[in-house]
Image (cartoon, rainbow, N blue to C red):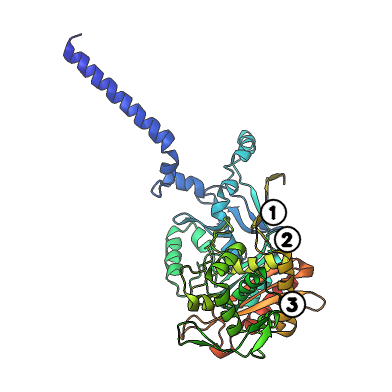
Amino acid sequence: MNRPIRVLSLVVFVLFLALMANLTYAQVARQTVLNERPENRRVTDARFAQDRGPIMVGNIPIAQSVPVKDHFKFQREYPNPALYAPITGFYSYYYGSTGLEASQSPYLSGATDQQVLEQLIRAAAGQAPRGAKVETTISAKAQKAAWDGLAGRKGAVVALDYHTGAVKALVSSPSFDPSLLATHDLKASQAAWEQLNKAAEKPLANRATREIYAPGSTFKLITAAAALETGYAADSQIDSSRYRLPNSDKVITGSCGGSKVSLSHALQVSCNPGFARLGAELGAQTLQEQAEAFGFGKRWLPEIGSAASRFPTGIDAAQTAMSAIGEYEVAATPLQMAMVAAAIANDGVVMEPYLVNRILRDDLSVISEATPSQASIAVSSTTAAQLRQMMVGVVESGTGQRAKISGVEVGGKTGTAVTDRVRTPYAWFVAYAKEYGVAVAVFIEDANVSASEVAGGRVSAPVAKAVLEALK
């Protein structure tokens, strides 16, 4: 063989090696990337045609796949769509998935290692693959009570089993119908997507976990906790007279029942000057550390995702005082404020919130089951006991009396947050019911009443009461 032929053979051999290496890389290393590319219609078609498992609330499916006579074979349906949309999310051909449809997709589609044997058996029997059943922690009664309580108003409700962290209700209003995005009519799905994203009321926004708002006076629970942890007692007297913010012309006023009141009474009547002055005395670092002990700064509930609640950093004394009453740049999710009430009810222990209880096969054998876990200790059990006594005072004799339940220890805290001079103030109420083992946060973004009539106790407390009673 002469030299030119040998060179040519070597070049061809190298090119074949390069081609084989590229094919191997594409098939192995880039398999996931290629499969997930939106223009890969074959893979998308295959996924959309799967018999996905149901998402359950008790024995009721809130998302399920049903057989249809088109090339996709199965249609995803959402019974009670708006009620459960913040939990299920959607499963769409063009727009992917959200909520439990996204986080639990490997189980719902039957693609986890634990489900391999089951799928092999089904294949051997000539049956199509089928996904697992996802069982949530939600109470249907509490979910309905929360939805009915909001009555179409913008807002959110979150209820937690404070012993375990299990989410018993999670409602965001207004909501949407996931079926509009899951439809096999792909043009209709695109039109629905555009309409939902353009809607001024933001129905796709999960106000319960993924949006943060000024918590108003519900944040006084954290300020009170910081005071008790640093040596104050529930009966400690604090200055409740009108308070001019440090280095500012702004004056905080309020009718607190005297120029000196106990810390407990200040919480009962939601005394702004008393808590603003107290916050300035405690200092920004103390308040920030206390807020973080309750969970501020962390993202919770990975099953559907959440925003991190925020306490501002680098603030001066005046800003600290305003932050102590839940204003300035303090912002929290309803989930986070439910966790604050839950931790106080649970002797100061913050439990990790969770939404998925179990994942089951067709024969109801358990693939996966949640285990409650402790996230942090926010306050001592002694401080928690004092805070509960103070919160009971709010409900029995203070601003939260509309949350009373006969024969039940209910502790709560109202909140009204003024964000600007145009928007209706936010109305908050957080509470716990000892005999039911449940804590709840109610947030109403738009109460549909005049600003002078908005108060957490008037607007949100009755909703909290209804949810608590649904969980008795």
Q: Gap in Å between the C-alphas at discs 3 and 1? A: 27 Å
The disc placed on residue 229 is: none
Q: Is residue 125 above or below residue 400?
A: above
- Name which quarter of the figure residue 432 lies in: bottom right
Residue furthest right as drawn:
407
Q: Is residue 8 above or below residue 427?
A: above
Residue corresponding to mark 1: 372
Amino acid type for the residue under numbered disc 1: Pro
The disc placed on residue 392 is: 3
For the residue pair 87 and 118, the one nearer the viewer reads as 87
- The secondary element bearing badge 2 is classed as loop
Residue corresponding to mark 2: 163
In this rendering, the count of numbered labels is 3
Q: Tell me, yes or no, if residue 232 can be seen here.
A: yes
Q: Gap in Å between the C-alphas at discs 2 and 1? A: 9 Å
Q: Estimate the x, y position of residue 314 in percent, counting from the top left.
A: 46, 68
Q: How many other residues sit within 10 Å of disc 1, few (<14), some (14-19) or many (≥20)? A: some
Q: How many other residues sit within 10 Å of disc 3, few (<14), some (14-19) or many (≥20)? A: many
Picture residue at 49% right of the left edge, 45% below the top:
46
Amino acid type for the residue under numbered disc 2: His
**Quadrant of the image containing the N terminus:** top left
- The secondary element bearing badge 3 is classed as helix
Side of 403 relative to 328 (left or right): right
Q: Estimate the x, y position of residue 83 in percent, counting from the top left.
A: 61, 68
Side of 201 relative to 116 (left or right): left
Point out the tag, 3 or 1, that comes first from the N-terminus. Answer: 1
Point out the tag, 2 or 1, that comes first from the N-terminus. Answer: 2
- Name which quarter of the figure residue 220 lies in: bottom right
Q: Tell me, yes or no, if residue 154 can be seen here.
A: no
